[in-house]
Image (spheres, rainbow, N blue to C red):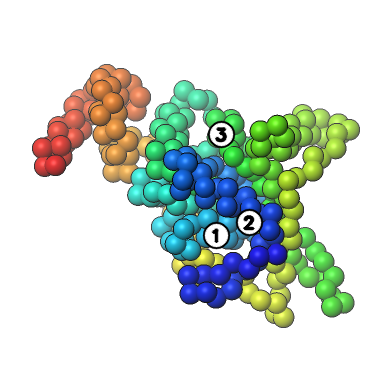
Amino acid sequence: MVMITDKNGVERYSMSTRLVGVIERIREKIYKEDSMVLGILWGGVGGGKSVKAQHIGFAINKNRELDISKIAFDKDEFIEAVLNSRKEVVIGDEGIALFFSRGSMTKQGRLMAELMAQCRQKNLCIIICVPELLSIDWLILESANFVGYVWESKKEINNRLVTIKGNLALYPAIVGNDYKMKIIHYLRTKKRNPHAKIFRPEPYLTEAGNPIGKTFKEVWYPVGEEAYRKKKESVLNKYKRKQTEKEISPKGKVVKDLVFKQFERGLTNKEIASYWNVGERCIRLWKKKYKKEMKKE
């Protein structure tokens, strides 16, 4: 096991040497190879996905920091985090609906494709946490560099039954031995026929999570537990007040950079209007704003 320390040298948590090797490979891709990395963690609610994603993200980031602004609970937060990040980790936490399965020609599908292009340009590592792996849009599943199952278990320690959260089974996409596609094939087969006689594929690595209880070390949140829970609660309250979220359009500030990118690529007003499903008048107004900003520069 390897101890992971914060920027002050304080030991915070441990990782297996094999997982550290995976993290080093991810660091090479985003820092040296002008690439991006996409990972998906799935498992039941309360199993430890969020903390595991933060621990992986913290170890990947060059400065050994992870800011709360890089943890996104909804689409707007995720878009903003992507647009304002470069060569670092962004986490789409529980409840983010942007990546759920849908028709590829919908407005959300087109927005997702545009976002993935942004992620590549900015050399980001994206980690998405979801309850069900197969609920993810196929475009994202196919692009994922790794998927990981995170779960909660029970173990007897010192003659008492203890809860263990954050157990991990990792399935990376490796050329010649694609662990990711093996587990996806297994899950699809079992979904179609729960009684199918098929063995669950072995993961690339497994490692135990953290025991929870009074006599054990508290789980460490790289973004701060209070800040994390406060942000999560505020998003949940927002959804309680507003159950159906409006479709994102060029009127939203968060997609301003995406619209401007389309102007830069030379798309016509008609093409952009069709993309966002709005009138051409709306796009003409945005083009005026775009030209004004270009003059200022």
**Disc 3 residue type (three-letter):** Ser
Residue farthest to the front, as pictured: 32
Q: Is residue 36 visible?
A: yes
Q: Which residue is mark 3?
A: 143
Image quarter (top left, top right, bottom left or bottom right) of the N terminus:
bottom right
Ranked by sequence position, the earlier of labels 1 and 3 is 1
> Label 1 sits on what residue type?
Ala
Q: Is residue 250 left or right of residue 198?
A: left
First in residue order: circle 2 vs circle 3: 2
The image quarter containing residue 182 is top right
Work out whether residue 209 or residue 279 is closer to the camera in this orientation and state it: 209
Query: Residue beneath label 2, please?
Result: 20
Decide which of 83, 275 is in the foreground and name it. 83
Residue drawn at x 73%, y 57% is 207
Residue in view at x 63 percent, y 53 percent: 21
Q: Residues within 10 Å of mark 3 (few under 14, many from 20)?
A: few
Real-space Cα separation, disc 1 to disc 3, in angstroms: 22 Å
Q: Helix, strand or loop at disc 2? A: helix
